[in-house]
Image (spheres, rainbow, N blue to C red):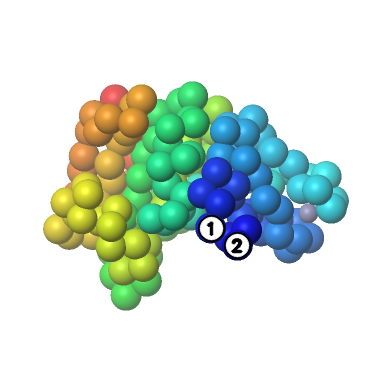
Amino acid sequence: MDRMDPTRLHLACPHCAATNRVPAARIGDEPVCGRCGKPLLDGRPIELGDADFDAVVTASKVPVLVDFWAPWCGPCRAMAPAFEQASRTLKGRALLVKVNSDENPALSARYAVRSIPTLVRLSGGRETQRQSGALPAGAIVALAGA
Ligand SMILES: [Zn+2]
């Protein structure tokens, strides 16, 4: 099934809502929507999970900052706007990723996530920084650049 191909991400266009399948290796190249031609990411964080996380992290030419979160977590929801703001600030310099820890137990176990939100910075696929607890946008930017 197409959905199981981990090298192609399903991204909903923020402008026309069309679903686009983007090769993981192209995620840093400012992919555009196949229907309306507008940018698919626009500096927004992308949602990844157990199925497609590795393909993107392996292909990313820039550091990846992962936000492990869950919908029931108040501090996670409170931090979401700051994370989106940091993502726009870091566009082209770092890739900001959200992982729903409830829906992706394999990733949560691999990174030993014990509390959320937890931010994990990966460079070349290796963990270089980690911070638990909600942060303001400036601190998220600093963590991604560390
Ligand atoms: Zn579109």
Image-based side of 116 in relation to 89, left or right = left
Helix, strand or loop for disc 1: helix
Residue furthest to the front in view is 1
Residue denoted by label 2:
1
Residue 110: % across, % down: 22, 49
Q: Nearer the viewer, residue 131 or 134?
A: 131
Question: Which amino acid does the dot numbered 2 rest on?
Answer: Met
* Gap in angstroms between the C-alphas marked 1 and 2: 6 Å
> Mark 1 sits on what residue?
4
Q: Quadrant of residue 32?
A: top right
Q: Position of residue 59 (x, y in %)?
A: 49, 31
Asked if the residues shown at circle 1 and circle 2 are in contact, with their CB atoms under 8 angstroms apart, the answer is: yes
Quadrant into which the N terminus falls: bottom right
Locate residue 78 relative to residue 16 in the image: left or right: left
- Residue at 47 percent across and 40 percent down: it is 55
Q: Secondary structure at mark 2?
A: loop
* Crowding near the residue tagged with mark 1, few <14, some 14–19, many ≥20 C-alpha atoms within 10 Å: few
The quadrant of the image that shows the C terminus is: top left
